[in-house]
């Protein structure tokens, strides 16, 4: 049942004029607004479900198996379709899993084709985008680079752009594109917030200089540690990190004369997370990627990657010949180790975690497993455990290792790393990192867990 303040769309503007595909709430909204009935369901469906009936003659459902696995996430259900609508798929518990308006390219599906657990979701999306909407599949990274660089040249002219680099894929690729367009007029800033991985500041700065980027490294570790002192709540920590980041960045940006633009490595999933009307993503975490920099900077924003997904960004990076060290890097969130140290942050804890993380990540690289993993790292838990080393009882810290596989970061499975590998890493950590006497491995998937612990 729709709540008063539920998001609404004026479907009259679209229905029958352009192809429309409503997904989950979108499908319910379409059904409800056209005379159907949406009711709270006795059976809430969260997770995997199997289709039981599919109209394979329908354009949207072409090539979809009768018992295809789909991903559901809903409490309400479409109890009755409007008159002019026909059913094109059902599951055992949800009769209206997909529908079409007769004589129009208007479709609704209750399940989520965009997540990888809907095994044939991509085919459904392709059917819609390519066969129903008639889009040509002619995107190539080379053409993207060519048109984007030309567009940036026209947009930026002789203006100066300032941009924060994180060592990550997105900001590095975005900066390289802008650099191709305006050269030294792009001023990059890389901040050491004291929460980076071991040696990361020096290594990344070095790679950027090798790439010809005009980049300044700023050591602001003390400022971050000071602001984080005594903070334990994850959102408070994120906010403090975000706030100090902006102060440091702003102070540096003001040292450059006449800057007009702020470059950002925003990619499409960031846009989705930030604009969601009232969905869960609005409160999952505070993100400083989109619209996070202060208004008083009065800079116009340039975001050359904001229509791309991560895999496309990597393809663009390859075309730009960015080194695999940067392109293949796992995502590493801005608050860095700050959200992998549960509870309050101290330089001593950062040091311990950097050592643990280094052993784990290096181990993955040495074992040839790094590229099979979407994201990996260690988490310093706020507990101590009893152990025995030699003849002595110890009471020391516990770390959790986390490694996940994913296609887009939206959903993720814990990575089934070989036992031998985990055993070696665990031994090395406990034998060499002073202060740690226990290593555990996180075996939760997203959802319901998240990739990061905080
Ligand atoms: N240490 C840093 N120094 C300078 N800028 C940074 C730093 N960390 C983050 N940023 C800036 O903030 C943006 C968002 O950071 P976040 O870690 O959320 O990035 P992301 O979405 O994973 O992208 P990326 O792949 O560029 O790291 C980065 O793209 C970068 O512009």
Image: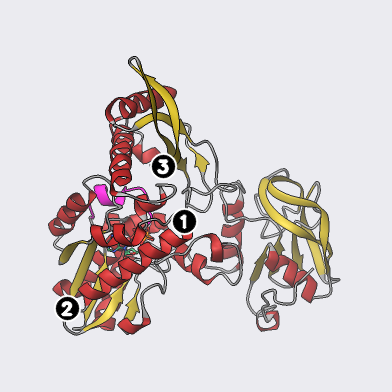
Say if mark 1 contacts mark 2, CB within 8 Å: no
Q: Relative to 166, say whether 19 is above or below.
A: below
Q: Choose mark 1 or mark 2, whichever is in front.
A: 1
SS for dot 2: loop
Percent position (x, y) of residue 383? 46, 38
Cα gap from disc 1 to disc 3, whole angstroms: 13 Å
Q: Which mark is residue 402?
A: none
Does the CB distance between marks 1 and 3 fall below 8 Å? no
| Labels 2 & 3 near each other (Cβ < 8 A) | no
Crowd band around label 1 with a 10 angstrom C-alpha radius: few (<14), some (14–19), many (20+)? some
Q: Circle 3 sits on which residue?
A: 379
Q: Residues within 10 Å of mark 3 (few under 14, many from 20)?
A: many
Q: Is residue 232 visible?
A: yes
Q: CA distance from mark 2 to mark 3?
A: 38 Å
The answer to whether 324 appears left or right of 388 in the picture is left
Q: Position of residue 50 (x, y in %)?
A: 72, 44
In the image, is residue 280 above or below residue 292? above
For mark 2, what is the residue?
256
On the picture, is 268 further left or further right than 171? right
Residue 333 at x, y percent in the picture: 38, 55
Q: Where 46 falls versus 96 (above or below)?
A: above
In this figure, which residue is indicated by the disc labeled 1? 234
Q: Secondary structure at mark 1?
A: helix
Image-quarter location of ligand 1: bottom left
Give the mark nearest the N terminus, 2 or 3. 2
Tell me which numbered mark, 1 or 3, is placed earlier along the sequence: 1
**Highlighted range, magenta:** 322-333
Q: Sequence order check: which comes first, mark 1 or mark 2? A: 1
Question: Looking at mark 3, is its residue's CB closer than 8 Å to ligand 1?
Answer: no
Examine the residues drawn in magenta and state their main secondary structure: loop
Q: Is residue 87 magenta?
A: no
């Amino acid at each position: 049942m729709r709540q008063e303040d539920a998001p609404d769309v004026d479907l009259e503007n679209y229905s029958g004029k352009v192809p429309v595909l409503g997904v989950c709430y979108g499908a319910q909204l379409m059904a409800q607004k056209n005379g159907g009935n949406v009711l709270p369901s006795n059976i809430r469906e969260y997770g995997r479900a199997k289709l039981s009936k599919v109209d394979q003659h329908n354009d949207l459902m072409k090539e979809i198996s009768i018992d295809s696995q789909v991903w559901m996430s809903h409490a309400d259900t479409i109890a009755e379709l409007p008159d002019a609508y026909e059913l094109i798929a059902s599951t055992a518990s949800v009769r209206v899993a997909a529908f079409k308006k007769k004589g129009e390219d208007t479709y609704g599906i209750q399940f989520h084709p965009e997540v990888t657990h809907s095994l044939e979701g991509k085919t459904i999306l392709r059917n819609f985008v390519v066969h129903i909407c008639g889009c040509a599949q002619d995107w190539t990274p080379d053409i993207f680079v060519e048109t984007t660089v030309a567009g940036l040249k026209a947009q930026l002219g002789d203006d100066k752009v300032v941009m924060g680099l994180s060592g990550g894929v997105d900001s590095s690729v975005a900066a390289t594109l802008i650099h191709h367009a305006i050269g030294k007029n792009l001023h990059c800033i890389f901040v050491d917030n004291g929460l980076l991985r071991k040696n990361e500041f020096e290594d990344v700065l070095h790679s950027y200089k090798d790439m010809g980027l005009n980049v300044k490294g700023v050591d602001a570790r003390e400022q971050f540690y000071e602001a984080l002192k005594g903070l334990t709540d994850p959102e408070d920590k994120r906010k403090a990190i975000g706030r100090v980041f902006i102060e440091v960045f702003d102070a540096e940006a003001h040292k450059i004369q006449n800057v007009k633009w702020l470059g950002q490595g925003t990619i499409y999933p960031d846009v989705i997370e930030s604009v969601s009307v009232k969905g869960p993503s609005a409160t999952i975490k505070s993100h400083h990627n989109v619209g996070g920099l202060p208004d008083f900077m009065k800079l116009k924003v340039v975001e050359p990657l904001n229509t791309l997904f991560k895999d496309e960004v990597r393809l663009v990076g390859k075309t730009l010949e960015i080194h695999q060290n940067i392109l293949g890097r796992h995502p590493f969130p801005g608050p860095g180790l700050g959200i992998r140290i549960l509870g309050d942050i101290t330089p001593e804890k950062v040091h311990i975690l950097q050592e643990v993380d280094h052993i784990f990540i290096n181990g993955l690289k040495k074992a040839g497993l790094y590229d099979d993993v979407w994201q990996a790292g260690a988490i310093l838990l706020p507990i101590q455990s009893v152990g025995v080393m030699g003849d002595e009882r110890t009471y020391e810290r516990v770390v959790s290792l986390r490694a996940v596989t994913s296609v887009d970061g939206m959903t993720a499975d814990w990575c089934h790393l070989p036992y031998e590998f985990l055993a070696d890493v665990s031994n090395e950590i406990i034998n060499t990192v002073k202060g740690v006497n226990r290593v555990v491995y996180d075996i939760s998937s997203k959802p319901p867990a998240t990739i990061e612990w905080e």
